[in-house]
Image: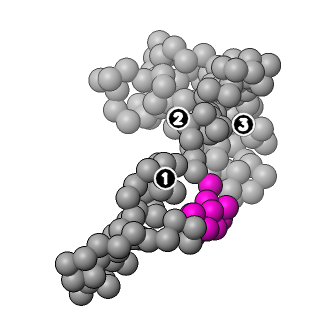
Amino acid sequence: MLARNYLTNTARNVIRTCLCGSKSFTYTKQYSSTTKNIDRNSLNQTLHKISSKYKVFKDSDAVEISDAYEELYKHPELIKEEPQVHDPFEGLNLERGVNGVYEIEDLVEALEKENSQDIFVAGVPVDLEYVDFICIVTGKSHRHMQAIAEFVRKVYKRKCHSNDII
């Protein structure tokens, strides 16, 4: 039990010496009721071995690691202009039409912007009372046709009012 306490105290004191850099602690050895001083030479040798193996860290020696935002503020030449975002609706009329959400000219313009092929527009007789025009379009592939339909729906949603049926 005494040997265990001795080792624990010695280890604790050695660690304090390494961390604090101070060698002013009293190192004692306890056997039953008597106390004996440890040989100072052997203690100094042990401390020298430990201090040469481990380095004591200080705030003055530390290198400050800054995050990305701090680096950008230190070096403003690294700040790049943000890339311009492409607006897919650029050049299209996004105002609601007079007779409906789409005017036929706006629909043809949107289809041409999406590189549609063979755009065919035909007027529907008034006595059918369904629509004014019918528009038939072809695309390069099935996937292209789906992309055209999706774009026409997006433009429709941008042009319509809140009371229009989607």
Going from N to C along the chain, the mark reached first, 1 or 2, is 1
The residue at the point 42 percent across, 23 percent down is 160
Q: Is residue 146 above or below residue 77?
A: below
Instruction: Identify the residue under disc 2.
Output: 154
Query: Label 2 sits on what residue type?
Result: Lys
Amino acid of disc 3: Glu
Mark 2 crowdedness (10 Å alpha carbons): few <14, some 14-19, many ≥20: few
Identity of the residue drawn at 25% across and 76% down = 34
Q: Position of residue 59 (x, y in %)?
A: 56, 37
- Judged from the image, the secondary structure of the residue bearing numbered disc 1 is loop
Element assignment for label 2: helix
Q: Secondary structure at mark 3?
A: loop
Q: Earlier in the sequence, mark 1 or mark 3?
A: 1
Tell which tag, 1 or 3, sits nearer the viewer. 1
Residue drawn at point x = 64 percent, y = 38 percent: 61
Q: Within the image, what quadrant is residue 3 found in? A: bottom left
* Kind of residue at disc 1: Lys
Numbered tag placed on residue 114 in the rendering: 3
Q: Which residue is mark 1?
A: 23
Q: Earlier in the sequence, mark 2 or mark 3?
A: 3
In this picture, is 109 found above or below 93?
below
Pick the quarter of the image with the C terminus.
Answer: top left
Q: Point out the frontmost of discs 1 and 2.
A: 1
Which of 136/75 is in front?
Answer: 75
Looking at the rendering, the stretch of residues picked out in magenta corresponds to 44-55
142 with respect to 117 (left or right): left
Residue nearer the viewer, 127 or 43 = 43
Task: Characterize the local packing of mark 1: few (<14), some (14-19) or many (20 or more) Cα atoms within 10 angstroms.
Answer: some
* Mark 3 neighbour class, 10 Å CA radius: few under 14, some 14 to 19, many 20 or more: some
Q: Could you tell whether 143 is left or right of 2 in the image?
A: right
